[in-house]
Image: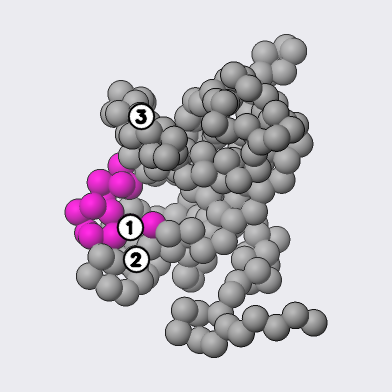
Amino acid sequence: MHMFWRTLLHTLISRFGPSLGHYDVARTRFITLPTDQDILRHMNNGVYLSIMDVARFDMLKRNGVWKIFQQNGWYPVVVSETISFRKSLQLWQRFTIESRILGFDEKAVYVEQRFVRPDADGRPEVYAHGYIRGRFLKRSGGVVSIDELTRAVGSPPAEPVPDWLLAWSENVALPATRAAAPSHWN
């Protein structure tokens, strides 16, 4: 339930945050709350993924893409995600999530997100680093094609999505929703 309140709070905050270009880095500030903690007294690994959702929503609000989605009756869904951890976030620590849209392949969009805190010299230091592969669905039914998406939001970034990330997305993909997906353990 606390993610609902965080999302609501960031919906209000993003109205006053700086506007961004579609492919600019968004910086969303957070604080580690008691409800984020696990039994080892640091932020639970599942909470990182939930907070990444809130930060992506903030990014989409501030870069204007959310408004385009609403006008077209579209909404984003996460297809796959991965995260690597370097340092733990402790209770009451302030941190920032840096989010940016990396680009597209023929079916999906890729977003990079970093959890950062200042180091001893005040420079941003990465605590965790994640990537998501997302698709866009139509409220009327069906999938938003990348052609429709780029017509609505503009050309993708000049820099292509890294090959290793494209390979990762292919390697972790599950069968399509209408295909069989039996659970077999080898």
What's the CA distance linking mark 1 and mark 3? 20 Å
Q: Which residue is depicted at the point 57% across and 26% down?
A: 34
Q: Which mark is residue 9?
A: 3
When the figure is inspected, residue 24 is found, relative to residue 185, above or below; the finding is: above
Label 3 crowd bin: few (<14), some (14–19), many (20+), radius 10 Å: few
Q: Which residue is depicted at the point 25% across and 46% down?
A: 67
The amino acid type, in three-letter code, at marker 2 is Leu
Magenta residues span: 64-76
Residue identifier under label 1: 75
Q: Is residue 21 left or right of residue 40?
A: left
Residue 82: percent from left, percent from top: 64, 54
Question: Counting residues from the N terminus, which is met first, the one under dot 1 or under dot 3?
Answer: 3
Please say if the residues under marks 2 and 1 sit with CB atoms less than 8 Å apart: yes
Which element is circle 3 on?
Answer: helix
Query: Is residue 68 found inside the magenta-colored segment of the image?
Result: yes
Type of colouring: one colour
Q: Nearer the viewer, mark 2 or mark 3?
A: 3
Please say if the residues under marks 2 and 3 sit with CB atoms less than 8 Å apart: no
The amino acid type, in three-letter code, at marker 1 is Tyr
